[in-house]
Image (cartoon, helix red, strand yellow):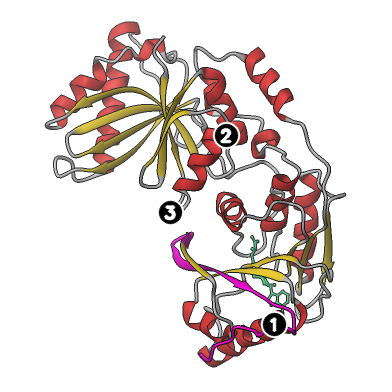
Amino acid sequence: MKENEFIATTMFGFEEILASELRELGALNVRPLNRAVSFTGSQALLYKVNIGARTAMRILKNIRSFKVTDEDSLYDAVYNMKWEDHFSVKDTFMINSSVNSPLFRHSHFVSQKTKDAIADRFRMKTNLRPSVDTSDPDITINIHISNDRADVSLDASGEPLFKRGYRAAQYLAPLNEVLAAGMILMSGWDGTKPFIDPMCGSGTLPIEAALIAKKIPPGIFREKFGFMKWKDYDDLLFTRLMESMLNPVDLNTEIYASDISQDAVDLTRKNIKKGLLEEFIQVKKIDFKEFVPPAEGGMVMMNPPYGERLKEEEINLFYKGIGDVLKKNYAGYDAWVLSGNPEALKFFGLRPEKKIELINGSIKCKFQKFSIYSGSKKQKTIEP
Ligand SMILES: C[S@@+](CC[C@H](N)C(=O)[O-])C[C@H]1O[C@@H](n2cnc3c(N)ncnc32)[C@H](O)[C@@H]1O
């Protein structure tokens, strides 16, 4: 039997992390691409990766690939696909397109042509046209055109997978859940030493850390996935997989979420409650400077303000203060800091051991690792 071909999309910088996650979940022929990973596997695998992959944004199932030369060839090829095998005229649908081709200038135009071809095909077969719904469609179709090659896929996730289902509320600009999970996986934290986010905002990093440490699949809270509306949807298989993938392990360490803002702490508590993680994350309203971390050492990961609303000297001073506190209070810790303000990061006064580029929303960020040694060892410090 021919294996299904899938593409998992992700964020900039997480291709290799996602590829290992997919291999671990049983994917075959795993190949990292640009902000995506291709792989093959069964229907069960498709469900598993939707439930279990922490760094995937969407999973797409390829249904046809063909060459295109112009808008007519695109229309004809899409019209000739057996759409009635995939969904019914009563289902609503939506097209997402991405185009990187001199043949087509606007992705909006490609979406329009594809939509017309599908609707015309249904009208020819049934005398009726399916309706488009761009907010909550039953079926999402993805078309990707690269030069003269078009790949048409069904979106198996529907709502993107960073929408885990645990977020009750958010504080200012929360990290995307996929970004937070990818940062933790990248750091190599294995759940055996304390994890602290002392500027937790709405708690995304500690919540993703708890899910990782307890081996709770990130999709377990979701009620809907795109594939549930497909004609071949197997509810029994899905339910069995959901049950078999939920085997939480004991947490072997402490996870802390704290913030100076009462609002942030309240929202973090709400999100933790919705994620059923109250037992596993300790939440506190406290200034980062006052927080006393466990003496054994571990991981401190944070996403401090980037200082858009502050004067340059103020933000540089704020970052210098963070560096000083790390040196003073966090001996034995690995500190990972994500910031969209690389200039301010230089004021930490610590030499980064690793520098990784990531994108938070549309902001280019540096994700840097600093190893904080105990007083007896010579601290690697630098002047800004
Ligand atoms: C960019 S937000 C963090 C967003 C968070 N990662 C999330 O996913 O929601 C920065 C946070 O740092 C907090 N903060 C600023 N100064 C602080 C300080 N001195 N001590 C503790 N938290 C602080 C702010 O209240 C804010 O919630």
User: What kind of element bears circle 2?
Assistant: helix
The residues tagged by marks 3 and 1 sit, at their Cα atoms, a distance apart of: 36 Å
Task: Say which element carries label 1.
Answer: loop
Question: Which of the marked residues, 3 or 1, is nearer the chain's N terminus?
Answer: 3
In the image, 81 versus 349, the foreground residue is: 349
- Is 366 covered by the magenta stretch? yes
Q: Which mark identifies residue 377?
A: 1
- Residue bounds of the magenta highlight: 358-384
Q: Position of residue 290 (x, y in %)?
A: 81, 80
* Residue 347 visible in the snapshot: yes
Given the image, on which type of amino acid does mark 2 rest?
Glu
Q: Earlier in the sequence, mark 2 or mark 3?
A: 3
The nearer-to-camera label among 1 and 2 is 1
Q: Residues within 10 Å of mark 3 (few under 14, many from 20)?
A: some
The quarter of the picture showing ligand 1:
bottom right
Can you tell which of label 2 and label 3 is closer to the viewer?
2
Q: Which residue is mark 3?
A: 12
- Circle 2 residues within 10 Å: few <14, some 14–19, many ≥20: few
x and y, in percent, of residue 12 in the image: 43, 54
Instruction: Say which amino acid is labelled 3.
Output: Phe
